[in-house]
Image (tube, helix red, strand yellow):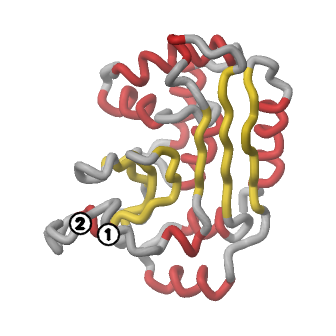
Amino acid sequence: MKKYQPFLDDFDEQLTKNNSLTVQKALFFNIAAKKADLAQVRKTGRVGDDVLNFYGQGNRWEVQWAPNVPAPELEEIRGSINILPFENVFSNWEGVAFFKDTPADSIRRRFFVVDFFADEAAVGLVVTAEHKDQMYYSDFENDPKPLQINMDGYIQLCVAAKGTIYWPYLLFELIEGEENPVSERIKKHLPELFPDFSFDAFSTLFGKLRIR
C-alpha cells in the first residue's frame, strides 16, 4: 500500500523552500476517513481501491500557492488543490455537476467531485462499476472527460505539475496529441517558478501511470 504522508510532506517542503512563491495553504489531514463510510462505499464495487486507499490515510488535501511577483503572464499560474473530505465527495452534487433537467441516464448524475480546485471545474469519480478505475475532469457544462489515470496516478501527476490550477490540460494534450492554450501556458511559464518542472518528465510519468 502506497504511503502518502512522506510523499506529500516532501512536496510541501519543496513549495515552502521556493522563494519565487508564497504558500497560502498546505494541509494534508492525515486522519483517515471513517472506517464505516469506507466500508459502505467499498461494498458497492463502484469505487476503485486506490481511492479508498488514499482516504484510508487522510481525509483532505489542500494546497494554494501564488507567485511572489505578480506579472501579467503569470496571472493564471497559481497552485490550487482542494481534495475534499470523503463524506463531502459523496454528497448530492445537483446544482453543481448536474441539474434537475439533466437526463436520468446521464453520466453527469454519476459524477462525484474529489478535487474541487476551481469554482467552475473539478476532477472526480464516475461512480459505476464500468468507470471506477479512472478519474474524470468536469467543467460542469459537458460530460466528464476521462483522464486515463486512477486516484494514485492523479496524486503523483498533480505533484509533478506542482498542483498548478488546470494542470489536467497537460493530460489532455498527451491524450489528444494536440497542444491546447492552457497546456501551452503552463509549459511556458511554470518553469519560471519551478525550474525543475519538465514536461518531458511529466509525459514519461503519465506513460507509466496511464490506464489504456
* Distance CA(mark 2)–CA(mark 1): 5 Å
Q: Earlier in the sequence, mark 2 or mark 1?
A: 1
Where is residue 89 shown, x and y percent of the image? 50, 68
Q: Nearer the viewer, residue 94 or 184?
A: 94
Residue 212 seen anywhere in this rendered image of the structure? no
Q: Which mark is residue 94?
A: 1
Q: Dot 2 surroundings within 10 Å: few (below 14), some, or many (20 or more)?
A: few
Q: Which mark is residue 168?
A: none
**86 to the left or right of 15:** left
Where is residue 15 shown, x and y percent of the image? 77, 31
At label 1, the amino acid type is Glu
Residue that label 2 marks: 99
**58 to the left or right of 204:** right
Q: Nearer the viewer, residue 44 or 212?
A: 44
Where is residue 46 shown, x and y percent of the image? 42, 74
At label 2, the amino acid type is Phe
Q: Residue at x 33, y 46 (%)?
A: 139
Asked if marks 2 and 1 touch (Cβ < 8 Å), the reply is yes
**198 to the left or right of 99:** right
Q: Residue at x 59, y 40 (%)?
A: 80
